[in-house]
Image (tube, rainbow, N blue to C red):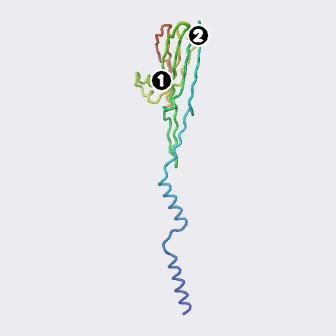
Amino acid sequence: MKISILLVALISIVCLSCDGRQTKKEALERAVSEFNLKSTPLELATFHPKGYVEIVTDTIIGNGINVHIKNYSLLAEQILVSNSTEDSSKNASYQRVFESEITISSAFKDIFSTHISARQFKAFDKDQFWDHATLQHTWVNQELSTDNLIRLDISFINPKNKTYKLYRMSIDNFGQQTLNLVEEQS
């Protein structure tokens, strides 16, 4: 009789301990999966250049013709270069948009003044290059410039597909300009 009471007690303990609760491992797995469903991916954005950039050059050509060029980045405009998603993060890489201001003057008068951006070129040229293009740099081509004719080289890049276009702007003493495409890589 003692054995049967002991056997019944043992079976009762075993049955009562199997109440269907989760093990620690199952509870941890469920908590992790619920957390992953609720969490939003971490978004990491990198910008090139990281902050505002301004490059100013003043060039004197011949007898007192001054060429002032200011190339600068816009903090509010950028081009998405690449976008990738990994486990719990989204990585995006951006290229900042650049623009340029040009002033050509002599000791007596202002000869020429303009603003250059990729948006202006996109308005005249419907090439897909301009959809993701930005000004790279504007500079005086000193080898080709004379007292009577200033030559500026203007390069644009499309960082998304790594193509570029190089233009040459010629400005005479009266402020008349011509613009020619010199080179491009598609």
Secondary element under disc 1, as helix, strand or loop, is: loop
Q: Position of residue 9 (x, y in %)?
A: 53, 85
Labels 2 and 1: the sequence-earlier one: 2
Q: Position of residue 143 (x, y in %)?
A: 58, 12
Q: Residue at x 55, y 38 (%)?
A: 46
Q: Residues within 10 Å of mark 2 (few under 14, many from 20)?
A: some
Q: Residues within 10 Å of mark 1 (few under 14, many from 20)?
A: some
Name the foreground residue: 41 vs 107. Answer: 107
Residue where numbered disc 2 is placed: 61
Q: Position of residue 122 (x, y in %)?
A: 42, 24
Residue where numbered disc 1 is placed: 117
Q: Residue at x 44, y 29 (%)?
A: 131
Q: Amino acid at mark 1?
A: Ser
Name the foreground residue: 67 vs 137. Answer: 67
Q: Position of residue 47 (x, y in %)?
A: 54, 35
Quarter of the picture containing the N terminus is bottom right
Q: Quadrant of residue 7?
A: bottom right
